Image: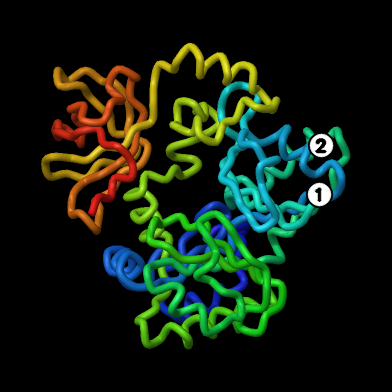
Amino acid sequence: MQQHTKRITLHETHVSLGGKMVPFAGFEMPVRYTSDIEEHRTVREGVGVFDVSHMGEFFVRGPQALALIQRVTSNDASLLEIGQAQYSCLPNDRGGIVDDLLVYKLAEEEYMLVVNASNIEKDWDWINQHNQMGAELENRSDEISLFAVQGPKAIEALQPLTELDLGSIPFYHFKVGTFAGAQDVIVSATGYTGAGGFELYVKNDDALATWQALFESGKHLGIKPIGLGARDTLRLEMGYCLYGNDITDETSPIEAGLGWITKFSKEFIHSEQLKEQKASGVTRKLVGFKLTEKGIPRSHYPILDTAGNVIGEVTSGTQSPSMGIGIGLGYVESAYAKPGTPIAIGIRNKTVQAVVQKLPLLTA
């Protein structure tokens, strides 16, 4: 294990639960406890808990808070009400993406930005560099633990632990209150699995007690700890982007199908150029696809047209535990981006047939 990987607060807990710890985004993280397929199914059918405490949390406060957020993010944060969250991205100054993130409006002049673990330092420097307006910034990434309790039975498992009415929190909204005895917990409905559920932002000091309370309360529902392996297959079935794979410093939000979080009702970093790109169209687009033959697509495999010409590259791929077929995301030349278009994936020395699919890839 590299010396400089950080440990999340409940590291020892995961080890004692049989979690296989691997280096991920600068942290030692549990990739699985039993098997990816079993953990995937637990979330789709019941309830599971991910410890995603490696994520970063920045607080932006003061009269200039909104002005800074509007400058550095692509979505329109002026539309947020208190208690609402928004998916957004930080465009860079050359057409790519610094990171994708969540913006929470906590109070009139207070926001929380939740960023990817691998980009904490990069994002912090980027936002500070553009803070000419003098908003107050605080990086509390090392003080906050984050548990994602996901699955159709999540409310049943969580409701006994809080007075907050969880059923009344719509998607991309949150409430703050006491949870399992811990004060000021942010309970948010912004899942990354498509299975329903909530995220709990708790202080590190409350992490262990909260974790134990979750498992006690959800015991009769078969609640289980879930690793990063299943998190990846769950998000991929939904077609959710993973930073570093499907979106990077080199991919534009327009190419990545993130036009819906790119609002030209305001000016932001590189907005003029992105506006032109949206108007004139892009040469490649991120698409979802399903294999129609046996095979597992992987990152960097070539995407081909029916004549065998390379038209793009897979950015994320897996065997879908829910559907039992190979699925993935990748960039293709725009002419091939329409759902229903036949394509093929070059898997080692074989050509495996596939078809472009509308997202989410998971269909009932």
Can you give x and y, in whole percent of width and height, for residue 197 in the image?
A: 46, 66
Helix, strand or loop under label 2: loop
Residue 332: assigned label: none
Residue 272, above or below 85: above
Task: Look at label 1 and name its amino acid.
Answer: Leu
Q: Nearer the viewer, residue 104 or 214?
A: 104
Residue projecting furthest to the left: 293
- Total marks shown come to 2
Can you give x and y, in whole percent of width and height, for residue 241 in the image?
A: 44, 42
The residue singled out by tag 2 in the image is 131
Can you give x and y, in whole percent of width and height, for residue 317 in the image?
A: 31, 43
Q: Residues within 10 Å of mark 2 (few under 14, many from 20)?
A: some
How far apart are the alpha carbons under marks 1 and 2?
Answer: 9 Å
Task: Look at label 2 and name its amino acid.
Answer: Asn
Residue projecting furthest to the top: 280
N-terminal label among 1 and 2: 2
The answer to which image quadrant residue 303 occupies is top left
- Please give the name of the residue rendered at 57% of the width and 31% of the height, measured from the top-left corner: 262
Q: Nearer the viewer, residue 264 or 21?
A: 264
> Do the numbered discs 1 and 2 sit on residues whose CB atoms are within 8 Å?
yes
In this rendering, would 102 be left or right of 157? right
- Please give the name of the residue rendered at 62% of the width and 76% of the height, measured from the top-left corner: 207
For the C terminus, the image quarter is bottom left
In this rendering, would 227 be left or right of 9? left
- Please give the name of the residue rendered at 57% of the width and 20% of the height, measured from the top-left corner: 274
Residue 93, above or below 46: above
Can you give x and y, in whole percent of width and height, for residue 42 in the image?
A: 32, 70
The residue singled out by tag 1 in the image is 137
In this rendering, would 142 be left or right of 86? right
- Please give the name of the residue rendered at 48% of the width and 76% of the height, measured from the top-left corner: 15
The answer to which image quadrant residue 122 occupies is top right
Helix, strand or loop under label 1: strand
